[in-house]
Amino acid sequence: MDIDVIDEIDTAEKPMHQAEVNCRVSQRALSGPSEGGRQSVQRESDMSERDAVGQPGVAPAARGTAGTLFAALYGELLAHAWHDPASEHDAYQLFHQRSLAMGWLDDRSGSGEGNASGQRTHVAPGLWAMNDAGWSHPLAAPEQNPISWFHVEVSALADDRPLPVQPFLRCAQDTTERIGAVHLTAVQVLLPVQGIDASARPPYALVPSMRTPDWFGECDPGARVPVKVRIDGGVDPAIPSMASRFARRIVPADQHVFAGHIDEVVPPGVFPAPPFDDRFWNGPPSHGVTLSGELAEWSCDAVGWLAATVADSAAHLGIHTPVLCTVVRG
């Protein structure tokens, strides 16, 4: 697909404003102490990635990163009868283990494994480094508390690869389902759009996720589900001013993963408030666009594909700050 046919790409740099500076704050603004991360950091020495990359928005000295990726899953979680809430197998440990097993964990800053001299001989680049995770969030509103949340630092992106939201949410779903049955009603992702260099995208991958819509080509046609999507730039007013252009990029004609249109009558209360301090990004949510439509299936896999498309679309339109993407079923 030739994205240029849809719209002229505006990649002009915007000056950094206070909102972008404000998103670079300490992790305390995100979560404070969490039952998952605080316990795990003392538990396993091979989880020392947290010390190397634990500051949101701050790249470790050894390598560049794309920025902070955060996800919250909402709905109902019915824990398995054998699950012990006090188990050491908390959200942080399980997500770390799943990331490691699938080859998604970036452990270049870890130091837990090595040879006789104590030096690591092999390291894996991976897609993200661990930061924190939990089953519920201390800053969430009681009536909108997520059933699980995950916070990582994304590795620098290859020019032709999307922001790894799809595997990230797949890992989040696998982790949550490990302890119980999940009835998912909404997924919320903070996208580090500032880590995407739209000008570096090659012609064959201007929006890299558009290379893979056929993964959903064999979905049961009856699995399509109505969704509402909120894309919010926080205090940055850019998104509403380009809502039509944004919608055309997210819903091109040559894909069938998501079909939708701008919906100006959806009440704000449909979407959960983000479970972190406004200073963590450029909040509060106040300038965005809402789409109503259909998703190929109701899964973190499909939501991840859509969110990656949203991130690249925002970057091509000249947005250089984090974007909050919330997808609600129904």
Image: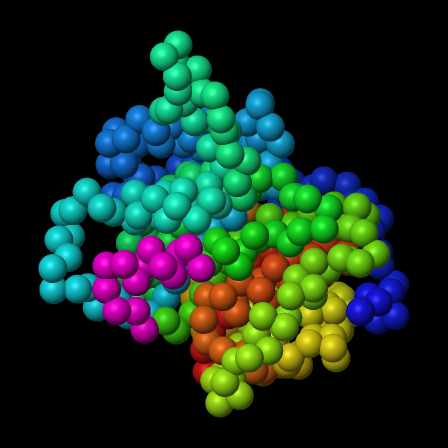
Above or below: residue 70 compared with residue 125:
below
Residue drawn at x 58%, y 64% is: 305
Above or below: residue 164 compared with residue 129:
below
- Dividing the picture into quadrants, the one containing residue 145 is bottom left
The span picked out in magenta is 170-183
- Dividing the picture into quadrants, the one containing residue 175 is bottom left
What is the number of callouts on the image? 0
> Residue 28: x, y in percent?
40, 37
* Relative depth, front residue between 242 and 157: 157
Residue drawn at x 60%, y 36% is: 65
Q: How is the image coloured?
A: rainbow
Above or below: residue 113 compared with residue 162:
above
> Residue 156: x, y in percent?
63, 39
Q: Is residue 232 left or right of residue 139?
A: right
The N terminus is located in which quarter?
Answer: bottom right
> Residue 167: x, y in percent?
50, 56
> Residue 84: x, y in percent?
13, 53
Residue 158 seen in this snapshot? yes
* Furthest residue in direction top, as rendered: 117
Residue 24 seen in this snapshot? no
Q: Is residue 137 left or right of residue 50?
A: left
Residue drawn at x 21%, y 68% is: 78
- Dividing the picture into quadrants, the one containing residue 234 is bottom right
Q: Per the image, is 255 magenta?
A: no
Residue drawn at x 43%, y 49% is: 102
